[in-house]
Amino acid sequence: MLNNKKEANLGLPHCNFFPKNRRGSHVGIILSFVVFITFLIFLYTALEPVIDVKKGKENLVKKLNIELTERFSERLITAIIANNSDPYIYDCVKINNTELEAFGLNAISKNSSEDIIKSNLSEDGNFLYVDWSGNETYFKIYYSEEKFEEHPIERACANETDVYYQGLITWKEQVFISRVNETIERYIINYDSSKSELGVPSDSDFSFSFKLSDGTELKTKEINISKDVYVGEFPIQYVDEKAETKFGSLIIKVW
């Protein structure tokens, strides 16, 4: 019996379930933790310049969106005119631009359905003559320093009336396609000057494009472009040469 027990004991593996000295395992854990923290510090140190550059470029894109939108914008005056003259006597309505605080501005006239009506500015810019078929009671006049399409009256106004009621008049800053084109032209002619005026740092470059509602894209060229390009696209409302409000987008690239 005794021999059998000894043989049985000899067959069991030697396992130390409760080691007396656990200092070695603690040291290994601490060393692993130190190595891990050191790796994280190294990784952050290596990536920090890249993160800072990316953040700086993204902020520059946002800044250029504000600067360019402001450069594209001009005041638009909208005046509602109610005419109650006798259509059998008068064939033109004479609008006093000075009373509307629109002296010297370009103008385009529309009816209540937003259809363009022929009109002429006087040589001194004091008056606007609007063709009157006799079917319209209300006119909408758009004024701006920016140019509109010209739709001149092709005949002389035999009889004109300045009897009308001045309705609602509004002033609003709007983006004009004409100013977008002017900014693009300035960029092409003198890029360094445009870059300086818009506050672009000397170690950065930029370009932009303006996408119209019909998909047409107005854009600058790209100078000294690198592989790391940061792009931002912003929805934008604009006014075209017919004084129609449309929606497009401004795309800005920075590198």
Image (cartoon, grey):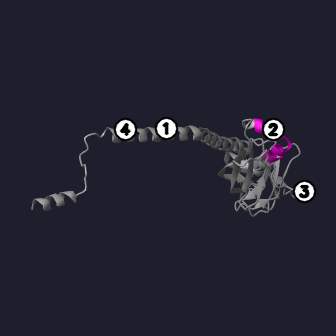
Residue 48 location (% of width, % of height): 58, 38
Q: Are marks 2 and 4 in contact (CB under 8 Å)?
A: no
Q: Is label 4 or label 3 in front?
A: 4
Under mark 4, the amino acid is Val
Q: Which residue is mark 1?
A: 38
Q: Secondary structure at mark 3?
A: loop
Q: Which numbered marker is on residue 27?
A: 4
The answer to whether residue 35 is visible is yes
Magenta range is 182-196
Under mark 1, the amino acid is Thr
Mark 3 is surrounded, within 10 Å at the Cα level, by few (under 14), some (14 to 19) or many (20 or more) other residues, namely: few
Residue 190 location (% of width, % of height): 84, 40
Under mark 3, the amino acid is Ala
* Side of 13 relative to 170 (left or right): left
Q: Are marks 4 and 3 in contact (CB under 8 Å)?
A: no
Dot 4 or dot 1: first in sequence order is: 4
Q: CA distance from mark 4 to mark 1?
A: 16 Å
Q: Is label 1 or label 3 in front?
A: 1
Q: Secondary structure at mark 1?
A: helix
Q: Which residue is mark 2?
A: 192
Chief secondary structure of the magenta portion: helix
Dot 1 or dot 2: first in sequence order is: 1
Determine whether 250 is above or below 204 in the image: below
Residue for point 76% across, 35% down = 196
Q: Is label 4 or label 1 in front?
A: 4
Q: Secondary structure at mark 4?
A: helix
Dot 4 or dot 3: first in sequence order is: 4
Dot 2 or dot 3: first in sequence order is: 3
* Side of 46 relative to 123 (left or right): left
